Image (cartoon, grey):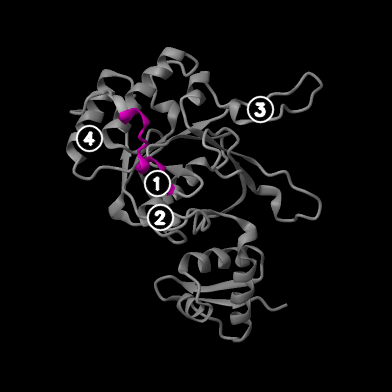
Amino acid sequence: MEQKLYKFYQGEDVFKLDDNCKEPLIEQILWKEDYVMLVAEEKMGKTILAQQMACALSSGTPFLDTFSVPKPVKVWYFATEGRANDLKERFIRMRNGVSVNPVNLCLIPTFFRFNTKEGTESLTEIIQTYKHEPPQVIIIDALYRAIKGSLKNDDVVNDFHAVVGSIQHYFGCAVVLVHHMTKPQRSPDGTMHQRTDKDSFGSAFLSAAVDHIIWVERFKKTEGDEEGGKDKIMKCDTQRSGIVFDSVRLRLLEPDPLLFIIPSKYEEEEHRIITILMSTKEGCNIDIIMKKTKLGRTIVYTVLKRLIDGGRVTKEGYRKIGVTYKIVTK
């Protein structure tokens, strides 16, 4: 890395703010040069959420169809665990419901730890090779496989932060760390301990170093809420700016397309699509539905998936010869 690993401000420069740092990459979620941690228990879909974030950033389309992405940016996705084909397969299914610009998305499976000699050499090689296409966002998934040594060791964690910080300084980019929480614990009275984002596994310096923490937990289903049993809540309790979102309810659609949605958002769109499908016994293909409802492809696929899962719409045919959607008649 050719840049100096420090900055120097003197005189009036001490009192001048860099307005570029205020530029949002994702409104209410991510800003230029942010250092963010996305944390959740196992099997909560944090990798899916991170991949969906990468897709939205690459294409400049709203994250979760809600949080504006002002412009497309280059994303480097460092995958430290899992097989490359599995990650690719998820991106393929996700692309059926989320806009993505492949030119702006770079998937980098890694087999090194960032805070090692081999790691810094590999990172330097990657940076020098692709510095003509600098990333605006780097996602590291998963954090525990990116660090050599105990995550509970303050020195180990700070060494990792120093390596990532030098990359961030070199590119002037934002970084998102994907991490897991400790196992749920019971209180002395036998009840489950109330979870917070402070329950992320490892040294306190993991959470102390980041600008804010996005965390995901299970949605607490209420009486009469038939669909909420598998939903999640995305929260941001720890933040320094005071302008990050508070909480959002999420629902995972799977297997194809694969994506999270905000369930309450699509009531009007559901009504419009149902109205179109009820007007014909033959059904409609995706292009006709889009034309008549004037809705985008992502929203149409998302709503159709919900209607199919709810037993209100059926899908007939195959992708290569055309798929028709029809209302389920009772």
Taking depth in this image into account, of 314 and 62 the one nearest to the observer is: 62
Magenta stretch: includes residue 80: no
In primary-sequence order, the first of circles 1 and 3 is 1
Residue at 58% across / 38% down in the picture?
Answer: 236
Dot 1 alpha-carbon crowd within 10 angstroms: few under 14, some 14 to 19, many 20 or more: some
Residue 27: horizontal and vertical position, in percent?
A: 48, 50
**Amino acid type for the residue under numbered disc 3:** Pro
Q: Nearer the viewer, mark 1 or mark 3?
A: 1
**Vertical placement of 59 versus 113: above or below?**
below
| Magenta segment | 12-25
Is residue 13 found inside the magenta-colored segment of the image? yes
Q: Residue at x 37, y 49 (%)?
A: 88
Depth-wise, is mark 3 or mark 2 nearer the camera? 2
Q: Is residue 327 above or below residue 143?
A: below
Tell me where residue 191 appears, x and y as whole percent: 78, 27
Instruction: Tell me which numbered mark, 3 or 2, is placed earlier along the sequence.
Output: 2
Residue at screen point 80% across, 55% down: 224
Residues at discs 1 and 2 in contact (Cβ within 8 Å): yes
- Neighbour class for label 3 at 10 Å: few (<14), some, many (≥20)? few
Q: If you read the primary sequence from the N terminus, does the residue marked by circle 4 or circle 1 appear first? A: 1
Classify mark 4: residues with Cα within 10 Å, few (<14), some (14-19) or many (20+): some
Rounded to the nearest angstrom, the CA distance separating label 1 from label 3 is 37 Å
Q: Which residue is mark 2?
A: 70
**Which quarter of the rendered picture does the C terminus lie within?**
bottom right
Give the Cα distance between marks 1 and 2.
9 Å
Residue identified by numbered label 1 = 23
How far is the residue under mark 3 from the one under mark 2? Answer: 38 Å
Residue type, label 1: Glu
Residue that badge 4 annotates: 127
* Left or right: 310 in relation to 42: right
Which disc, if any, is residue 184? 3
> In this rendering, would 226 be left or right of 286?
right
